[in-house]
Structure formats: structure tokens, C-alpha cells
Image (cartoon, rainbow, N blue to C red):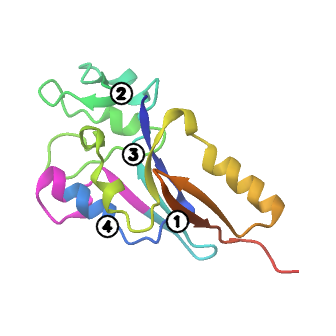
Amino acid sequence: MSKKLTVIPEQCSGCRICELVCAIKHFGVDNPKKAAIRVLTTYPHPVVRMPIVCSQCKVPACAQVCPSDSLRWIDGVVQLDEENCTSCYKCVEACPFGAMYIHPDYDLPIKCDMCGGDPECVKKCPKGALRLIPEAALGESRRLNNVLSYSQMKEIEFYEKGEKKVIRYAEVGKEEL
């Protein structure tokens, strides 16, 4: 079953560890501007931290505009063929999520390759804001949040791989009556 890298912004602390581990894994440098993931923070109120990473679109806009056909689906991931890429950056402009990046030290667009199916950012995220989940479960966290908001629950318990886990939900943006 195909898995997808998913962001749960409510759990992001803005630590940017994901950016660092990505840059170290792919470029061997401690430079978050060379990462294929970026944490955007909005101010003043409410403060929102949102990791932006490639959505691995089923019909990728980046691949549709690529004049050298350098972006294509391989093993469930939109991969960049570095040898054929002409560095025109049309893919960067076309990405509807702004999830492809440019760095002046690197001649090619920077795009998430899912670390070969085992993303470092997911493994190192201390808050669990980045998760690798089956495509069939996409939207499940939002559905669960909606149900919990109606029932006024503050947490839910479940078992994953035989281990008991608890998710606590913060009531962000709700006024106390």
C-alpha cells in the first residue's frame, strides 16, 4: 500500500529539525535553506507553523510544465531526473504548494524524494507533526478532529502495533464561554 508524507500543523512546534535533517541527509550540510521541506510561520495571531513539503501529486503540475520530462512518477514518488534537468525552474513556479525550492549553490530544483520511502524528517520530528501514513487514511486526522470538537473530548486513546498511545487535542482558536 502506498504511503504519503502528511503534515499535522497543529502539532508543529516550529523547531525546524525537519529542515536540518533533510539538508544534512541530502547535502551533508547544516543549512536549512538546502532542505526540501520548509517550516513557514505566520504572525501575529494566531501563530501558525506549517511545514511545506512535496505532496507527491497524482497529476503533478511540476511534471506537466517540465520541458525536459525530468519529473516523473517512480515507485510512488515524483522523482527529479538530475541528468536531464535543464534548471529552467518552471517546475518551481508551477508547484501549487510552493514545495520546490531553489538555492544559489545548487543548480537544480530542490524537491522531496521521500528519502527512498523512509523520510528522515518523519523519524526526527519530536512532535509527530510529520507522518508517513497509508493513502487510504488521508483526511483521517481532520475527520477525527471534527468529531472530537463536537464531543468536547480532550484526548483519545488507541493502540498502534500493540502499544497504547494517547493524542491530546488543544482547543486552538476557541473562546471560553
Query: Counting other residues with Cα less than 10 Å from the Cα at mark 1, is it few (<14), some (14-19), or many (20 or more)?
Result: some
Whichever of labels 3 and 2 marks the residue nearer the N terminus, that label is 2
Query: Counting other residues with Cα less than 10 Å from the Cα at mark 2, is it few (<14), some (14-19), or many (20 or more)?
Result: some
Q: Is 27 colored magenta in this rendering?
A: yes
Query: Counting other residues with Cα less than 10 Å from the Cα at mark 3, is it few (<14), some (14-19), or many (20 or more)?
Result: many
Q: Which residue position is annotated with label 2? A: 76
Instruction: Write the start and end of the magenta stretch as one range.
Output: 24-39
Task: Look at the numbered disc 3 and give the secondary structure of its residue.
Answer: loop
Determine the residue positioned at 72% across, 71% down: 173
CA separation in Å, label 4 and label 1: 14 Å
Horizontally, is 76 left or right of 10 in the view?
A: left
Query: Can you tell which mark lies on residue 99?
Result: 3
In the rendered image, the quadrant that contains the N terminus is top left
Dot 1 and dot 2 residues touching (CB under 8 Å) = no
Whichever of labels 3 and 4 marks the residue nearer the N terminus, that label is 4
Q: Position of residue 160 (x, y in %)?
A: 50, 52
Query: Can you tell which mark lies on residue 38?
Result: none
Task: Kindly identify the amino acid type of the residue bearing the numbered disc 3.
Answer: Ala
Determine the residue positioned at 28% across, 39% down: 113
Task: Kindly identify the amino acid type of the residue bearing the numbered disc 2.
Answer: Gly
Q: Is residue 95 above or below residue 160?
A: above
Determine the residue positioned at 35% across, 39% down: 92
Determine the residue positioned at 17% across, 66% down: 30
In the rendered image, the quadrant that contains the C terminus is bottom right
Residue 44's image quarter? bottom right
Q: Which residue position is annotated with label 4? A: 17
Dot 4 and dot 1 residues touching (CB under 8 Å) = no
Task: Kindly identify the amino acid type of the residue bearing the numbered disc 1.
Answer: Gln
How many discs appear?
A: 4
Q: Which residue position is annotated with label 1? A: 11
